[in-house]
């Protein structure tokens, strides 16, 4: 049968049955993160074991995915996180979101647990469950090669590596890029372990003959998309900085600002920063014949990714991003760019979140497992222990908090058990507020205050002072929840925050595609609604305001060179969401009168 546009696909892995459903009216205006979070809230027991049969895994393209909207190919993956115990949405680039959208799949919902390892083949004829024995135990690179050899070179592949098979809490879900490399990941929160718990090794997406995405007003959509694309390319960050030096351009920027966490968050500056900077990487890539700029998904106009070659001029890794370079670099005091690239390659192949694993390695170094700066020892840990799931490898694979507890470390940079990313919350205080209060554990992408704190995009809020940070984080968390629902790359926010005409063009694209009359206020309300759904799930799972707090050492230890601490009160942090929730309660009360 041919797939019609906009359907929900439910895959009952226990009974090996697939059900195709009409999209309920309540889900019609949702996509991406909004849809994954709503389905998880509606259908998953908040107190379930994340690796048990009651958890579900939801894959949802964004509202604009599959269209010609620029940089709109992000895929949202949602479930209950085995790392944090909270609701989780993690998103990735690659080819999968565009292909799923063109097949008319509003969301793919995986339920239950298969008795044997499966590969799901997704095409215009529906979803087919196939035996996965020929790829079980293989890394993501080899898995993709085997599956494309079987189903065609143009097939998109989503897969887990050995880390997901072993249900490690740091396991990611790899999404192949346009060249078939497994370098785009739904990395955070351990959702790769959830896919592994369901015994799904991979999904193959063949969109040949797909019906495509319906656009109600093609001319209006084209006009808005082209205008938005021009705004992105005209912005100095989206159109110049990111395409030239990639996200690693931030290494020197954050180092200069004193906010680059170094030696397990002991200081905000790294003496070896220039050796691992975006500028150095750019020169290295060019000298070796790599690609300093590369699109992470079809339709990406910012092209902030890259292809990195080794000293012999041979492919080593791609999607070698700022967070990865920082996590294994400054955080572990490793200033060898090639060693960092090899660690990135291991994480991509084994299927691991580079942020979680880099912070974990820093905690392990503090715990005496190996010295800071020992990149040869780090490579050995990954190639021998993590890859083979030895007892030590399993400890590391469970993340920073688990590893720190195992080794008696007290300085563990996590919130809700998830590792902090590459911005020290004492020197970039707005992002610290986001770390503390986001629904999904420490996550910079949930409310990227680096825009105003460091880059002076959308205004300036002094990163070393508390003033303005609560409102900044709140507003960015609302906006991000909405952006994550569209399928747009988060980096479009640079232009949206600086160019008044940019966000209206996003609304114009949505209206033209779906025949709607949305306003800017509707987009803001969507963001607020998503956050309320996620907080409702977490509350039912036992989370309270007491979990929206920083670890003790971040509050008490000054971060050189500024020697600032994270000194927000609990009442201040609680106000991030209390404002939204109080307004919602007032509106509900008014509607009853």
Image (tube, grey):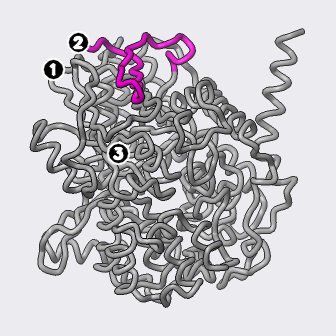
* Residue 367 seen in render: yes
Front tag of 2 and 1: 2
Using the image as rendered, state which of residue 574 and residue 536 is in the foreground. 536
Residue 230's place in the image compared with 396, above or below, is: above
Q: In the image, is 120 to the left or to the right of 34?
A: left
| 10 drawn magenta | yes
Q: Tag 1 or tag 2, which sits nearer the N-term? A: 2
In the drawing, what numbered circle is on residue 209? Answer: 1
Return the x and y of residue 178 as percentages of the image width and height: 20, 46
Using the image as rendered, state which of residue 265 and residue 399 is in the foreground. 399
Q: Tag 2 or tag 3, which sits nearer the N-term? A: 2
What count of labels does the image hold? 3
Label 1 sits on a secondary structure element that is loop
Q: Which residues are magenta?
A: 3-29
Q: In the image, is 188 to the left or to the right of 529?
A: left
Residue 79's place in the image compared with 166, above or below, is: above
Circle 3 sits on which residue?
93
Q: Determine crowd level at label 3: few under 14, some 14-19, many 20+ residues with C-alpha closer than 10 A.
A: many
Q: Estimate the spatial distance between the alpha carbons at disc 3 and disc 2, rounded to whole Å.
A: 26 Å
Circle 2 sits on which residue?
2
Residue 464's place in the image compared with 7, above or below, is: below
Residue at screen point 22% across, 25% down: 123
Return the x and y of residue 498 as percentages of the image width and height: 52, 47
Q: Which image quarter holds the C terminus?
A: top right
Label 2 sits on a secondary structure element that is loop
* Residue 501 seen in render: no
| 590 drawn magenta | no
Q: Estimate the spatial distance between the alpha carbons at disc 3 and disc 1, rounded to whole Å.
A: 22 Å
Q: Which image quarter holds the N terminus?
A: top left
Residue at screen point 33% across, 61% down: 350
Q: Are marks 2 and 1 in contact (CB under 8 Å)?
A: yes
């Amino acid at each position: 049968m041919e797939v019609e546009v906009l359907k929900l696909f439910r895959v009952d892995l226990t009974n090996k049955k697939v059900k195709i459903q009409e999209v309920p009216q309540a889900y019609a205006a949702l996509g991406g993160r909004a849809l994954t979070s709503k389905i998880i809230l509606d259908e998953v027991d908040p107190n379930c074991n994340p690796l048990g049969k009651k958890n579900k895994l939801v894959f949802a393209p964004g509202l604009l995915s599959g269209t010609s909207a620029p940089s709109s190919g992000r895929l949202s993956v949602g479930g209950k996180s085995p790392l944090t115990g909270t609701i989780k949405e993690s998103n990735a680039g690659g080819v999968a979101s565009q292909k799923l959208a063109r097949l008319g799949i509003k969301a793919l919902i995986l339920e239950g647990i298969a008795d044997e390892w499966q590969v799901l083949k997704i095409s215009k004829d529906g979803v087919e469950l196939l035996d996965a024995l020929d790829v079980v135990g293989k890394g993501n690179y080899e898995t993709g090669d085997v599956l494309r050899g079987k189903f065609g070179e143009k097939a998109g592949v989503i897969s887990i590596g050995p880390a997901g098979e072993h249900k490690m809490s740091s396991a990611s879900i790899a999404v192949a890029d346009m060249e078939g490399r497994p370098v785009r990941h739904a990395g955070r929160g351990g959702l790769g372990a959830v896919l592994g718990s369901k015994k799904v090794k991979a999904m193959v997406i063949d969109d040949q003959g797909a019906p495509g995405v319906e656009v109600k007003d093609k001319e209006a959509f084209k006009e808005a998309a082209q205008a938005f694309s021009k705004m992105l390319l005209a912005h100095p960050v989206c159109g110049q900085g990111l395409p030239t030096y990639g996200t690693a351009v931030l290494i020197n920027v954050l180092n200069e600002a004193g906010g680059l966490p170094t030696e397990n968050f002991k200081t905000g500056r790294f003496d070896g920063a220039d050796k691992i900077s975006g500028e150095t990487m750019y020169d290295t890539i060019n000298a070796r014949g790599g690609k300093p700029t590369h699109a992470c998904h079809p339709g990406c106009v910012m092209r902030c990714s890259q292809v990195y070659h080794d000293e012999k001029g041979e492919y080593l890794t791609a999607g070698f991003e700022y967070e990865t370079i920082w996590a294994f670099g400054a955080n572990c005091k490793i200033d060898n760019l090639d060693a960092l690239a090899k660690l990135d390659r291991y994480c991509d192949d084994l299927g691991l979140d580079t942020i979680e694993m880099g912070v974990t390695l820093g905690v392990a170094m503090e715990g005496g497992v190996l010295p800071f700066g020992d990149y040869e020892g780090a490579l050995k840990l990954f190639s021998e222990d993590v890859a083979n799931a030895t007892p030590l490898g399993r400890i590391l694979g469970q993340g920073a908090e688990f590893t720190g507890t195992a080794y008696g470390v007290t300085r563990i940079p996590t919130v809700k058990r998830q590792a902090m990313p590459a911005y020290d919350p004492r020197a970039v205080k707005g992002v610290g507020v986001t770390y503390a209060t986001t629904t999904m554990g420490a996550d910079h992408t949930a409310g990227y205050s680096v825009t105003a704190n460091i880059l002076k995009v959308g205004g300036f809020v002094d990163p070393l002072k508390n003033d303005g940070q609560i409102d900044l984080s709140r507003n960015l968390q609302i906006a991000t929840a909405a952006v994550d629902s569209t399928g747009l790359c988060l980096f479009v926010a640079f232009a949206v925050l600086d160019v008044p005409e940019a966000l209206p063009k996003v609304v114009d694209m949505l209206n033209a595609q779906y025949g709607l009359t949305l306003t800017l206020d509707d987009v803001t309300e969507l963001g607020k609604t998503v956050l309320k759904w996620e907080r409702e799930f977490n509350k039912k799972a036992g989370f309270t305001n007491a979990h929206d707090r920083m670890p003790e050492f971040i509050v008490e230890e000054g971060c050189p060179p500024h020697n600032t601490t994270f000194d927000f009160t609990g009442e201040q942090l609680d106000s991030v969401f209390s404002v939204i929730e109080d307004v919602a309660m007032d509106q509900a009360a008014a509607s009853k009168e």
